[in-house]
Image: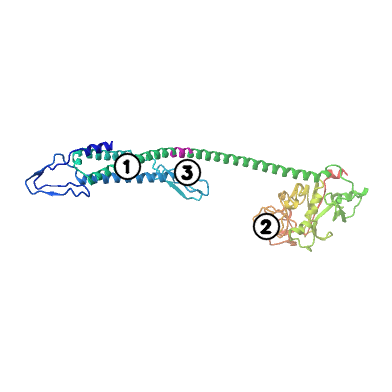
């Protein structure tokens, strides 16, 4: 059609000079044409042409506008194409994809594992470039109409002028075709943008679903782990308690039945009660072999007090032995068996777990007054799997006697020395009261305290039995001794 139009224009009659107005200037402008020139008229009347020619400036402005629009479309299409096909760099960790619709210049943000961000600049409200294409087509149509309207003038153009106009028409046609291609690319990009938006929405939906699933899985896993941990803790506690009960029962089981006979029938005595049962009636040193201490050890047996058969575990009489000692000494025992001595926590434990034992404590002051305290239940570390680790706790009950009770408040307490603090006080009671005992916070008795010989000005740091002589009187003599209870002895 463009060629047809140019044919019509080439067949039009040559341009004729018309009358020109007085003192007016006109321009017939064809580039590189020697046949055309400027004419100036000073006369009052000039010839004027019948059809009015299109001015040169209008044509040039139209072409420049067309080129500017085409350049803008080309740049815009290139930017869109680059933004569409540019692949985001791979990150070290899993990317987090999100849309930022609140921001005017970024639709998609990719956050990599290293914390860096990549923004893909795709305007969610992509501008409509159809109006630009319509404007471009309008410019092209206007240009063709202008050329057609001046068909008569074009007939007068010959040679190089005609070739120039033909080349211009061809360039306009090429630009129009290129603009059409750009329009097709633009439509393709818009479709690609729509597909990309849908894919991004799908990815975001999947990401949200995965995050929810992971969160639910983590919560369920924590619940499972907590349940398993609670079950294991419960099983461990139950196993520990069962082990302790079984061990204690095993330790005490042999004496719940009939006690083995003492020395009379040739069996080894387990304590002084067995020796007494075998016919021995003299106080003195004997060897005993407790059930859980088969190697045996020597003890002092009291065969005369209250029916005899007592195994002495502690004695104070003259202050010749230092009782302010460390844990190891109290565990193994120290002193002289016939004088001041401590049998040892390990040995006392081995004796008391053989059966049901009672404790008698004989006391004497410096005025030669005497008293005693007796307890129907006594034991050291009775229910301990590891008695030393447990601190050799005291079991005491059922008081009778003349000295008053000063020991029941110590029931259940662990043994404390100056180098091992097992009491309930903020301070070490053994260090503060210069002794070693089953202190609570701190004591009502302190039979392993300092030998201070009666009244003293210091407070409660002597050999004290508070219910008889108070807190500032250190006793002259004390003796702690144990034997099986009456029911145990009657089974002999």
| Outermost residue to the bottom | 320
Q: Which image quarter is the N terminus in?
A: top left
Query: Is residue 121 something that shows in the picture?
Result: no
Q: Earlier in the sequence, mark 3 or mark 1?
A: 3
Residue ID for mark 3: 97
Q: Nearer the viewer, residue 211 or 51?
A: 51
Q: Which image quarter is the C terminus in?
A: top right
Residue drawn at x 84%, y 59% is 338
Give the residues in magenta.
196-202
Residue ID for mark 2: 428
Q: Is 199 contained in the magenta span? A: yes
Q: Position of residue 457 (x, y in %)?
A: 69, 62
Q: Position of residue 154 (x, y in %)?
A: 20, 41
Q: Is residue 88 above or below residue 333?
A: above
The disc label shown at residue 174, or none: 1
Query: Is residue 221 something that shows in the picture?
Result: yes
């Amino acid at each position: 059609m463009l060629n047809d139009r140019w044919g019509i224009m080439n067949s039009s009659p040559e341009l004729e000079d018309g009358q020109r107005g007085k003192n007016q200037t006109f321009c017939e402008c064809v580039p590189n044409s020697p046949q055309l020139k400027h004419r100036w008229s000073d006369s009052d009347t000039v010839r004027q042409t019948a059809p009015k020619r299109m001015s040169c400036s209008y044509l040039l402005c139209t072409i420049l506008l067309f080129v500017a629009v085409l350049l803008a479309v080309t740049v815009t299409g290139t930017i869109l194409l680059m933004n569409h096909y540019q692949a985001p760099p791979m990150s070290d960790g899993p990317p987090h994809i999100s849309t930022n619709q609140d921001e005017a210049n970024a639709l998609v943000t990719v956050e990599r594992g290293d914390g860096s961000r990549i923004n893909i600049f795709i305007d969610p409200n992509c501008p409509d470039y159809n109006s630009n294409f319509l404007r471009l087509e309008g410019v092209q149509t206007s240009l063709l109409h202008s050329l057609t309207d001046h068909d008569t003038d074009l007939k007068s153009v010959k040679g190089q002028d005609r070739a120039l106009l033909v080349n211009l028409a061809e360039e306009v046609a090429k630009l129009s075709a290129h603009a059409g291609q750009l329009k097709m690319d633009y439509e393709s990009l818009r479709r690609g943008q729509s597909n990309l938006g849908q894919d991004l929405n799908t990815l975001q939906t999947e990401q949200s679903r995965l995050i929810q699933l992971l969160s639910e899985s983590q919560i369920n896993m924590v619940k499972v782990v907590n349940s398993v941990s609670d079950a294991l803790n419960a099983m461990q506690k139950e196993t520990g308690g069962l082990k302790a009960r079984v061990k204690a029962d095993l330790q005490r089981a042999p004496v719940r039945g009939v006690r083995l006979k003492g020395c009379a029938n040739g069996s080894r005595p387990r304590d002084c009660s067995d020796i007494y049962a075998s016919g021995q009636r003299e106080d003195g040193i004997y060897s005993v072999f407790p059930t859980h201490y088969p190697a045996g050890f020597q003890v002092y047996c009291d065969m005369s007090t209250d029916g005899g058969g007592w195994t002495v575990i502690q004695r104070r009489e003259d202050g010749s032995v230092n009782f302010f000692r460390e844990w190891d000494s109290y565990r193994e025992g120290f002193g002289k068996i016939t004088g001041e001595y401590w049998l040892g926590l390990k040995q006392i434990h081995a004796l008391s777990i053989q059966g049901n034992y009672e404790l008698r404590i004989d006391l004497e002051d410096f005025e030669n007054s005497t008293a005693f305290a007796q307890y129907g239940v006594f034991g050291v570390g009775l229910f301990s799997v590891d008695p030393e680790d447990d601190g050799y706790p005291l079991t005491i009950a059922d008081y009778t006697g003349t000295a008053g009770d000063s020991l029941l408040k110590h029931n259940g307490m662990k043994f404390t020395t100056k180098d091992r603090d097992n009491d309930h006080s903020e301070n070490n009671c053994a260090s503060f009261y210069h002794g070693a005992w089953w202190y609570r916070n701190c004591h009502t008795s302190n039979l392993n305290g300092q030998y201070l010989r009666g009244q003293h000005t210091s407070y409660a740091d002597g050999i004290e039995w508070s219910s008889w002589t108070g807190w500032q009187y250190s006793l002259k003599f004390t003796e702690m001794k144990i034997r099986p209870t009456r029911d145990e002895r009657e089974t002999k």
